[in-house]
Amino acid sequence: MKLYYTPGACSLAVHIVAEEAGIALELEKVDLRHKRTESGADFLAINDKGYVPALVLDDGSLMTEVAALLMYVADRKPEAKLAPAAGSLSHYRALESLCYIAGEVHKNIGGLFTASADAREPLMANAARRLDRVARTLEKQDYLLADGYSVADAYLFVVLGWAPMVKFDLSPWPALKAYSARIAGRPAVQRALRREGLIS
């Protein structure tokens, strides 16, 4: 499979899950501003949505949207236990977490990258309310799901990593800071960060 990615973008979550599962990915970096891949291809001709992640499957078809890709990659290696078994209640809890991160946390923190001065305050207030809820969970358990580390943690880790870049202070949530440090220490996370040039 081939992952079109931008270093540190939400595509990093897919990369992390592949590393956790022991799935080898071909990587191609995308310049989102100019919509060009590192090999010079027109990214819009590959993915007309114009953003990452985009995953070319083994049959040559394209799949997009981070939550779908996370579940797809995890389901390729169920023995890695990165997503609960399909059909189980825990599986739907994982989907619930992914949807919440995508629709509430990613949207608000990610929105700060391009927000005007007037738009920043409501985005920050919304993000704070969402993170209050997440922090309450992480004060009681190490990971988002009671079953343990999952695709949802890879995604939340990436989004929380954007906070310093958008000047969003996480210090009111010690549980989130401890959680991010815990996830960052995982060998698969280190490998993905290193491969994307985010750490040396």
Image: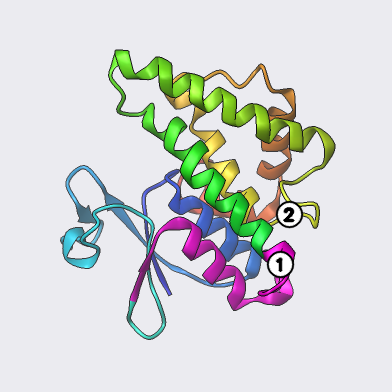
Q: Which residue is mark 2?
A: 149
> In the image shown, does 80 or 95 lie closer to the viewer?
95
Report the mark closest to the observer, 1 or 2.
1
Mark 1 vs mark 2: which is more N-terminal? 1
Secondary structure found at label 2:
loop
Q: Is residue 22 left or right of residue 69?
A: right
Mark 1 crowd level (few <14, some 14–19, many ≥20, 10 Å Cα): many
Number of labelled discs? 2
> Residue 177 occupies which quadrant of the picture?
top right
Instruction: State the residue in front, 178 or 29.
Output: 178
Dot 1 falls on a residue whose secondary structure is loop
Tell me the distance, in whole angstroms, between the alpha carbons under discs 1 and 2: 10 Å
The residue that label 1 is drawn on is 84
Residue at position x 50%, y 25% in the image: 126
**Rendering coords of residue 166 (x, y %):** 43, 24
* Residue closest to the far bottom: 59
Vertical comparison of 140 with 148: above or below: above
Q: Nearer the viewer, residue 125 or 44?
A: 125
Q: Amino acid at mark 2?
A: Tyr
Where the N terminus falls, by quadrant?
bottom left
Q: Which residues are magenta?
A: 62-91
Name the residue located 38 percent from the left edge and 18 percent from the top edge.
Answer: 120
Q: Is residue 97 left or right of residue 186?
A: left
